[in-house]
Amino acid sequence: MAARVDLVINGRRVSATAGQTLLDAGLTGGRVIPHDCATGQCETCRVRIHSGTVDEAGTRIGDTVLACRARLTSEAAIEFDEVPDVVRRGGTVESLVELTPEIVEVTVALRKRLAYLPGQYVRVAFAGLPARDYSPTLRSNGSGELNELIFQIRRQDGGTVSSHLGGRIGPGSAVKVEGPFGHAFHRLGRGRLVIVSSGVGWAPAWAVARASRLREPARALLVVAGARDPHNLYMRPALDWLRERGAITILTCSGAHPPGDARPGRPTLHLPMLTADDIVVAAGRPEMVAAVQFLAAAAGATCYADPFYAADRTAAASNPADLNFIQRLLQRVSRNQKAKTESVA
């Protein structure tokens, strides 16, 4: 018979079995740890090890591990940030606005409000099509209603869902939403907040940056946002809004012939020297996010990230070992570093 061990989750003790994942132990004991994919990819279930030891399964970054992969070996205590409960909501598409030839702003009117923290994402099924993950955001002027979800979606060539924008997905189309998920949300803090985004990763980045300006206007804020093609630099008005309120903003373009107001190259090329006091939020393509995570870990900074995946996770999730490569790399960098924690307001 497997040994029984105690697991303390945010101060509440549950009885578990040695060898269980932290996520399963919590669910069995009636203490739900926020999670989504449960395959080690989405980062929603990352928790802090307060005391004790676990089999980290190659997911350790600083003093955190992924609860869906790490397993109990002895008594331990873990902590995670409290987030809104995952719920399901129904609604309809209210409007579509072409932000660029490739990126569409989709506004969904919900029948009942869905609570989320700025930077989290939700699972959305438009007009009976397969569900996809999108981050609710604000319009470029910072506006948005409580019963609205505003998404910035890039049309993918041959995309199962995005190719229907303006056709099957239009005003009046039925929408089903589930969430929120993710851990790269806005947290109050004292250290400098550094936000890095690429492409439509600007959606959660803008939500976090705006929340920071409104909730903690005196906090140092640096925002780096970019796109590959000049015509997809749709975040200029939002960057102007932030700059007018004291934030430092950097616009980048990694494609050919960058415009005069954008620095050439990827966002990571224009990051400042990070310090151990910085809090970093990264959003965009996985390779960009991984590079930011690496730079943050090397500096001892705390980094929160939910990478954007254009396709679903089914194929990738079939090989968890590959998914944890970045975690293993970051673990080597941060093995002897103590990650900082910031409380959620």
Image (spheres, rainbow, N blue to C red):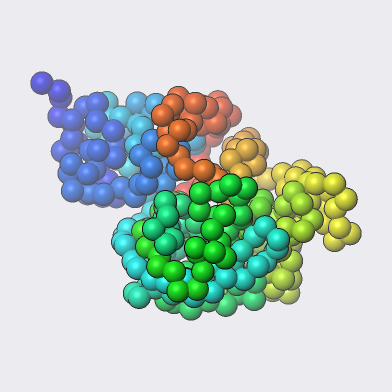
For the question of whether residue 207 can be seen, the reply is no
Where in the figure is residue 230, as x and y percent of width and height? 79, 56
Give the image quarter of residue 117: bottom left
Residue ranking furthest to the top: 1
Q: Residue at x 35, y 68 (%)?
A: 90
Above or below, 21 against 109 in this view is above
- Which residue is nearer to you in this view: 276 or 258? 258
Q: Give left or right: position of 210 versus 242.
A: left
For the question of whether residue 166 can be seen, the reply is yes
Q: Residue at x 88, y 50 (%)?
A: 257
| Image quadrant in which the C terminus is located | bottom left
- Which residue is nearer to you in this view: 154 or 251? 154
Q: Give left or right: position of 249 versus 60.
A: right
Where in the figure is residue 46, as x and y percent of width and height? 41, 42
Above or below, 232 against 330 in this view is below
Where in the figure is residue 53, as x and y percent of width and height? 33, 29
| Image quadrant in which the N terminus is located | top left
Q: Residue at x 28, y 33 (%)?
A: 21
- Which residue is nearer to you in this view: 270 or 141? 141
Above or below, 242 against 228 in this view is below
Q: Residue at x 72, y 53 (%)?
A: 226
- Which residue is nearer to you in this view: 73 or 93? 93
Where in the figure is residue 208, as x and y percent of width and height? 56, 62
